[in-house]
Amino acid sequence: MCSPRFLTKALRRLAAVAVLALTPDAVFAGYDIYEKDDQKLEIGMRLQPRMEYSRTAASGGGTEWLRDYMIRRARLKLNGKMQGVSFGFEWKIDGTDQNGVTPTAAVENAWMEYPLNKSLAVRAGLYDAPFSRDLLTSDSKQLAVDRGAVSAVPSTFGLVDNVVGFDLRGKTKSGRAQYVVGLYDNRTIPARRQDIPMLIGRVDLNLGSTKDIYQDAHFGTDKWYCLGINGQVQSSIDGPGFTADSTSNEAAGVDGMIDVPMGRGRFFARGEINAIRQVVMGPAADRNSTIWMLGGGYLMKEKLQPFVRFDRIQGDTPIGGTPRDITYAGANFYQKKHNLKLQGDLQFVSGTGQSLDGGRLQAQIDF
């Protein structure tokens, strides 16, 4: 049975944690749970309530508006270090109360990173594939409310933002150049059809600041000039009927980002192009698709950021869907940088015959 003295100490600690939780700096910065010697543990959370309207096919023909209020993302995060080994863990329940979605709890990230020296490490587990700046930029730090076609199309071929595998990653002493090369499972193809894993590699060149290179708005006076080059190949993929070595997937992409002070604010621009090729054995023709995007915004007084983003899908429709252009226009309002913000955008899609194809409004707390 617990002694009164023990209960008193426990209540004091609990009260201290409660007071800390009500402090604004603690809410936005996250929490250090434990740190001693070479051990460290941090806890975080992300919540994204969203209101979304989109056009969908009507039962009698034509289209109609579909309304959806949802919790787009709900995440709990743990990060830290144990005996020099870094780790990350993220647990999610996404799409709660979303039309056509059955939310389930799942692991989003779970990885360990072993340092080999000051500039070289090995990472293993479940984490972001080193392909596409759009995919490597967190959902919490995107210019528009969500990612676009430039990463959605590669995702159908296994280049999703979370894969299981291991890699070798390193950087120069200054951090101006960073690289990753690894082997990963393809999470969109059944395991029996994969004889060999995906090989993915990426090189990042950072001519300005080397901090936080994957986010669509920076704050302060630093300058970012970033260029990324990546590629992927997976051969010996069995066909749907387990026909031996019937297909192979190849992808390559280039992306860049600039974020610099301009006038009384900051100018941000990002561009990316990804080319995908599916080689099919036998009489069937190879399939090729190219997807690219351009986006930009202007951050005023580190609070309001109007933006526009343009996506284009072209090439073979079995890969990219119907060739189309998609434009998003909106604004972000930063109450506490990316930790607390509001986002909204409107969607315009070519070829639909509609003046407006969708709209989204999302709030976010992330620490």
Image (tube, helix red, strand yellow):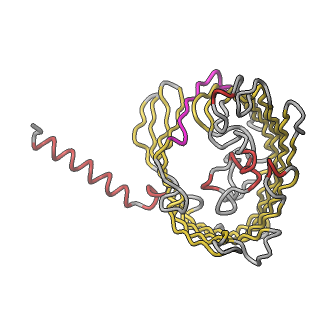
Q: Is residue 159 left or right of residue 87?
A: right
Location of the N terminus by quadrant is top left
Q: Nearer the viewer, residue 84 or 353?
A: 353
**Residue 307 found in image quarter:** bottom right
**Residue 129 found in image quarter:** top right
What's the magenta region? 107-121
Vertical relation: 291 (above or below) 253: below
Q: Point out residue 14 in the picture as x, y percentages from the top left corner.
A: 27, 50
Q: Is residue 195 left or right of residue 279?
A: left
Q: Point out residue 332 in the picture as x, y percentages from the top left corner.
A: 65, 68
The residue under the point 64% across, 25% down is: 122
Q: Nearer the viewer, residue 204 or 194?
A: 194
Q: Is residue 95 left or right of residue 248?
A: left
The residue under the point 74% across, 36% down is: 175
Vertical relation: 190 (above or below) 30: above
Q: Is residue 277 visible?
A: yes
The residue under the point 88% across, 37% down is: 284
The residue under the point 78% across, 34% down is: 232
Give the residue furthest to the bottom.
355
Q: Nearer the viewer, residue 241 or 205?
A: 241
Vertical relation: 177 (above or below) 132: above
